[in-house]
Amino acid sequence: MSEARSRRDFLMLAGGATAVAAGAAVLGVAGRADASPSEDFPAGLTAVGETEKAFTSIDGVPIYYDRNGSLQRLTFYCTNGFYSRLVTWKRRLVTISAGAGSAYSSLSYFASAGTYVSKPGAHGLGRAIDIDQVVWSGAASRPIDREYASGTLSVRRRYLALDAVTRGTFRYVLDGWYDAGHQDHIHADDTALPTICSTGSRSDTVFVQATCNAFTGTALTVDGVWGSRTGDAFKAASARLGVTGDPHTSSAAWLAWTERAAARGFANLAF
């Protein structure tokens, strides 16, 4: 969901202005959590108690808060189901990135601007995370540095690889191309499963457009509108990736698409 408040507000107590001490909950001030018309927030979802799942690591990899100029070890909160999905995401990252060489031999840490936040939307449900950094033993993807707009192709490809693995695990995923509010992190939630590629979704469309540009040499306008040129580029990319099935209707096909694109991104290879 499009967040109107800066993620730098996330380390504030709800309704107050006192920073949370190290080891305390990552909470946030109340704010808007609007969805775009193509990413409607589902109705009928139940809010989580903030203490349902407390964690300082994801499947053994430490996670830090990174919005005060340095990494801080805090306790994050989410639903049990969302944490399980985070574990799946972490394991996919390990498996897919490992094929790109020794720089990806192990994950060192994650950095985030928040999970559960006392505000409307997916964060308030304990079903969202904002990803600032993923750091391996010899490589890193740092959305916090606005790497989606990097002038270095290999950096953009690695950002898109992280983006792709995230899209194979969550829905919705909002990245730097989605809007100005997400230029310094990747938002992921699980409020609109299953994971497929929707031509009516701005989020999915800008990702496909940016990915085709970075890996296949197209020059699509990254505008979130799924027109004929985007459709043709997506079909060509799917063929080059050897994806069978329809990623618009099949979660398995979309997972294959995102995982194969991610593998190319970590290895800095075109397709």
Image: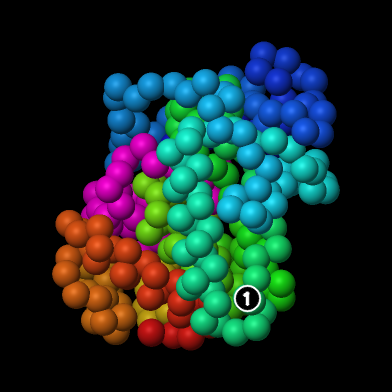
Given residues 219 and 253, the one toward you in this image is 253
**Residue ID for mark 1:** 104
Give residue 236's quadrant in the image: bottom left
* Magenta run includes residue 203: yes
The way the protein has been coloured in the rendering is: rainbow
Name the residue at 27% across, 71% down.
234
User: Residue 93, position in %: x, y?
Assistant: 52, 65
User: What residue appears at the point 69 percent right and 28 percent down from the top-left corner?
Assistant: 25
- Left or right of 58, for residue 175: left
Task: Specify the amino acid type for callout 1.
Answer: Tyr
* Left or right position of 108 against 101: right
Residue 72 is one of the magenta-drawn residues: no
- Residue 183 seen in the figure: no
Closer to us: 227 or 91: 91
Tag 1's secondary structure?
helix
Q: Residue at x 44, y 85 (%)?
A: 270
Image position of 213 with respect to 57: above or below: below
The part of the image, by quadrant, that contains residue 172 is top left
First to last magenta residue range: 181-208
Residue 199 lies, with reference to residue 104, above or below; the image says above
Q: Residue at x 30, y 44 (%)?
A: 193
In this picture, residue 239 sits left or right of residue 91 = left
**Local crowd size for mark 1, using a 10 Å CA cut-off: few (<14), some (14–19), many (≥20):** many
Quadrant the N terminus occupies = top left
Tally of marks? 1
Q: Residue furthest top?
A: 15
* Residue 76: x %, y % from top left: 64, 36
